[in-house]
Amino acid sequence: MKKSFKSFIINKDFDGSRVDRFLKKKFPDVPQSLFEKNLRKKNITVNHKKVKNLFKLKIDDIVDVYTEFKIKKTARKNLFFTTNDFNELKKNFIFECEDYCILNKPYGYASQDGLKVKKNVIDILNLNSKNYYIVHRLDQETSGLMLIAKNRFYAKRFSEMFKLREIKKKYLVILNGKIKKNKGELQTKDELNGKEIVSKLYFEVISKRNNFSYLEIDLITGRKHQIRKQFSDIGHPVVGDTRYGDKKNKNPLCLLSHKIEFEYNSKIKKYKATIPKHFKTCLETFF
């Protein structure tokens, strides 16, 4: 019998995962074609049997790899962050357990990597390990609470809960102008790839003064830039939002992911962000 180069026992994190996706996690530099070739040649087996790349793994399955992948090393991507950024983010954790953490994200950090992104939350947290998984995003300019999974099982679980709207999120926002209604609903419809997309939120005014409005938002759908775009469309751009129409205020964006609530281990978990300095300054100035 051949001796395996690497052997893995599947735990709950990879229950239901395709074998090729599991292998990609374990060998991120290996191309997909090499996995498929070695699966065909039975150099990679599951429970000592030949399987296809689409095979779904179950808990306690044994994946044996009988080959040592030899690949050319590519140049490492330039990093624009250091352990100081890691320490800064960890300092802003308001809760952490074995399955998830709650980050009070500072202004200026993107949630994940992108074309013009230099610093992003998930790569910084995974600087020395691969223990953190993104399950939702905040804009780079938006501050406040982010729920981050710490294993694949809860990454899948929380992602599904977001899709089913079982995770409640509330925001605080300062708008230009005095909004007419003291509470209400904004609902818009757009088309994306031939499908109708509905964006929906509820709002309630906390204060109106000096041609500014301070609101709490109950976000129902969570589309990209949803709060910023919907209020801009009715003539009330978010303070500091130069992209969506605020041409007079040079402040950082006054949008805060303030509260998050969800069920975990049959208990309701509630978390609340502290209001950042730039947001407090605007409240003191305008109200």
Image: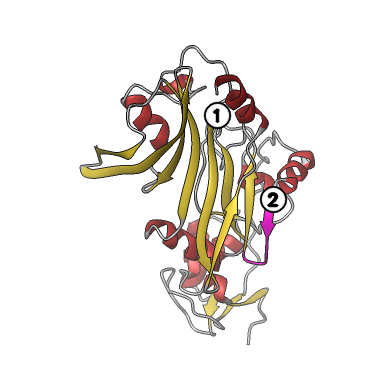
18 inside magenta stretch:
no
Judging from the image, what secondary structure is the residue with disc 2 in? strand
- What residue is disc 2 on? 93
Q: Decide if residue 185 is in sight here.
A: yes
- Please tell me in which quadrant of the rendered image residue 246 appears: top left
Left or right, residue 40 beside residue 187? right
* Observer-nearest of 127 and 162: 162
- Give the label, 1 or 2, closer to the camera: 2
Amino acid at the residue labelled 2: Phe
Q: Amino acid at mark 1?
A: Lys
Which corner quadrant of the image does residue 199 belong to?
top left
Quick check: 257 left or right of 76? left
Segment colored magenta? 94-99
Q: For residue 43, say whether it is visible.
A: no
Number of numbered discs on residues: 2
The CA span between labels 1 and 2 is 26 Å
Give the quadrant of the N terminus: bottom right
Left/right placement of residue 89 relative to residue 244 reads: right
Image height of 182 relative to 99, above or below: above
Q: Position of residue 37 (x, y in %)?
A: 48, 65
Q: In the figure, 266 relative to 193: above or below? A: below
Residue sitting at x 53%, y 85%: 47
Label 1 sits on residue: 116
Dot 1 falls on a residue whose secondary structure is loop
Q: Residue furthest top?
A: 248
Q: Position of residue 20 (x, y in %)?
A: 49, 65
Residue 54, placed above or below residue 202:
below
- N-terminal of the two: label 1 or label 2? 2
